[in-house]
Amino acid sequence: MRFATRFAALLLGMSMAALAMAGDYAREQKWADEILPAVLVGDPVWLEGPDNHKFLGLYTEAPNAKGAVILGHGSGVHPDWGLIGMLRQSLTEKGYTTLSIQFPVLAADATADDYVFTFDEAAARLAKATAFLKQKGYGRIAIVSHSLGGRMSYRYLGGKPDEAIKTWVAVSSPGAEDWGKLKLPVLDLYGQNDLPGVLQNAAIRAPGLKQPGSAQQRLQQADHFYEGQDGPLLEAVSNYLGQHL
């Protein structure tokens, strides 16, 4: 009886993990329905992810683009949210075509640990976004991520990323992974008044910034969401892209 109970609990746990891994597609659609009518810059594109699920991207072309940038948001939000929405538009003005994609989302009360189950799907979406940009003729692509989107991006970059990915700007990443295994230049950017976990793990990540051109930068007066710091944030990101993309 105890074996049967444990087996049932194991199956339930596996089932819950599988559901978490897939993300909350209904919530993704709700985000899309809410934001698309208000999107004035860029065009919506629907890319096919795992299990034939189509996820939203906001694609904005820059005239005579110097390269392309994939943008990935933090937990629970959308491709036009906050600083990601600002960067996807403003980087276009700096000469970079942008594709801001919907990362997997969970329920509003989900924790960062819950999101670990979505990292593989997020990595698959980054691969699809890269393929989309390559089809558009871009051979030099960067990833710019914010918050938990940094851990999702690391899952992709720490595997076998496409050779077209030339650099990564991780904005306020909370992760403590070993970035020494990455084979591209990285800017580890965070705020002076960032979240405690981000500040603590920045010191852990620093020794892994081994690739030529990799750097760690603290933005003065900035918090985790860079409130009132759009200009300095854009400058830091675009300057780094200018050096490596």
Image (cartoon, grey):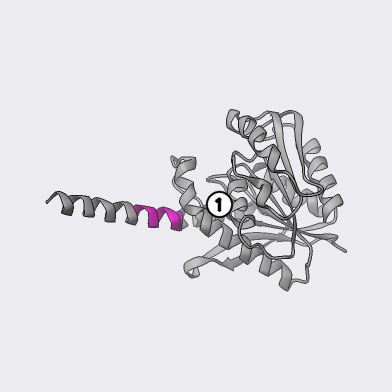
Vertical relation: 68 (above or below) 77: below
Image side of residue 97 versus residue 110, left or right:
right
Majority secondary structure of magenta residues: helix
Q: State which region is magenta.
A: 16-23
Q: How crowded is mark 1: few (under 14 residues within 10 Å), some or many (20 or more)?
A: few
The residue where tag 1 is placed is 34
Q: Is residue 59 magenta?
A: no
Figure quadrant of the C terminus? bottom right
Please count the marks in the image.
Answer: 1
Q: Position of residue 179 (x, y in %)?
A: 66, 46
Quarter residue 187 falls in: top right
From what the image shows, is residue 200 above or below residue 143?
Answer: above
Q: In which quarter of the image is residue 209?
A: top right
* Residue 117 picture location, percent across and down: 46, 52
Residue 224 in sight: no
In depth, the one of 129 and 243 nearer the eye is 243
In the picture, measured across the screen, residue 91 lies left or right of residue 152, that is right
Q: Residue at x 64, y 56 (%)?
A: 157
State the SS at label 1: helix
- Identify which amino acid the numbered label 1 is placed on: Glu
Left or right of 172? Residue 21 is: left
Residue drawn at x 49%, y 53% is 118
- Please give the name of the residue rendered at 47% of the width and 68% of the height, measured from the top-left corner: 51
Is any part of residue 120 visible from this angle?
Answer: yes
Seen as rendered, the residue at the extreme left is 1
Q: Residue 229, percent across and down?
A: 75, 33
Q: In this view, does 199 lie to the left or right of 134?
A: left
Which sits in the foreground, 188 or 32? 188
